[in-house]
Amino acid sequence: MIVKFKPVILPVITKWVAEKILKSGDGELEVSLDLGLSKAKVTISGGSVSLPTGDVISLKVLEKLEEGDVYIVRENEIFKAEFFAEGKYYRLFAPYPEDAPTLEISGIRMHRTEEVTPWEDAKMKVVSIKVFPNASVLDIGTGLGYTAIWSINFGASSIMTIEKDQNVLKMAEINPWSRKLADTRITILLGDASELIEKFDDCLFDRVINDPPRFALAGELYSREFYYEIFRVLKPKGWLYHYVGEPGKRRRKDIPAGVIKRLKECGFEKIRRQDVGIVARKPAGV
């Protein structure tokens, strides 16, 4: 099913922004109300802060914000960007001031956050397979949309991105860094990638980014059958980036080695480990 992405554009505040406001005293102050993407003027007076949207927030409320949490402002009230749905807990988490947040699902973060921002983490995946102008890209695991957006930033003309969890897309709608998912060059499909990929024509994509959850949560996206389908839909000389993280590291299990073995069995060549992922190429003339 194709999903029309509709960003919800509301002021977004973090503890870092709140601290700037609390320290400034009465008067005008320039802060970011979209996690660092732009600046806006707010007015502090009489124990409250007025936002450009007309919302007025008590400074006492700002004192209670917690570090790392992302807060949405609507109708003079602040709401934490979190919700429970279908037995899972969804939360936007900002590991760095004025930068892209990551998504947590029941405590599991969808991006790396140590020594690299979620935004840079996504960029590295796209750079690793050299997404180029006018490229067609299949992005498996939309998440907050960062790899799809980076593909656009590098000039891709067509991105097909697949997300299985509609609650993830709901969270993306309120994330300022996800707003470019509304770009007409991006098509979002809601469904199981292991089933939807079977409907695509052969040799359709220049690049494929397989960015699944950990193996224990989505083993089908690490299977030989799924890799055959990726191989089929890739154009000859097309590249795959497959995120694998560092699973089993503490238990001395080398899950990436199993991934590499299955990719070879499916016909991929030039397979190598790249940071926390694996890149592989479909041979010419296949």
Image: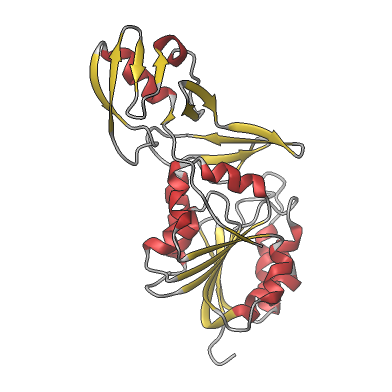
Give residue 11's quadrant in the image.
Answer: top left
Q: Residue furthest top?
A: 46
Q: Where in the figure is residue 223, as x and y percent of width and height?
A: 74, 67
One can see residue 268 in this view: no
Left or right of 53: which side holds 179?
right
Residue at the image point whose x is 47% and y is 45% from the top: 118
Left or right of 208: which side holds 190?
right
Q: Where in the figure is residue 84, as x and y percent of width and height?
A: 69, 33
Residue at the image point whose x is 56% and y is 60% from the top: 277
Q: Nearer the viewer, residue 26 or 18?
A: 26
Residue at the image point whose x is 65% and y is 35% from the top: 107
Left or right of 175: which side holds 164?
right
Residue at the image point whose x is 61% and y is 79% from the top: 233
Question: Relative to 15, does residue 99 appear above or below in the rendering?
Answer: below
Question: Looking at the rendering, in which quadrant would you find the N terminus?
Answer: bottom right
One can see residue 98 in this view: yes
Q: Residue furthest bottom?
A: 285
Question: Relative to 192, does residue 169 appear above or below in the rendering?
Answer: above
Give residue 191's quadrant in the image.
Answer: bottom right
Q: Where in the figure is residue 275, as x and y percent of width and height?
A: 50, 57
Question: Looking at the rendering, in which quadrant would you find the C terminus?
Answer: bottom right
Q: Where in the figure is residue 154, as x and y percent of width and height?
A: 37, 65
Q: Nearer the viewer, residue 118 or 259?
A: 118
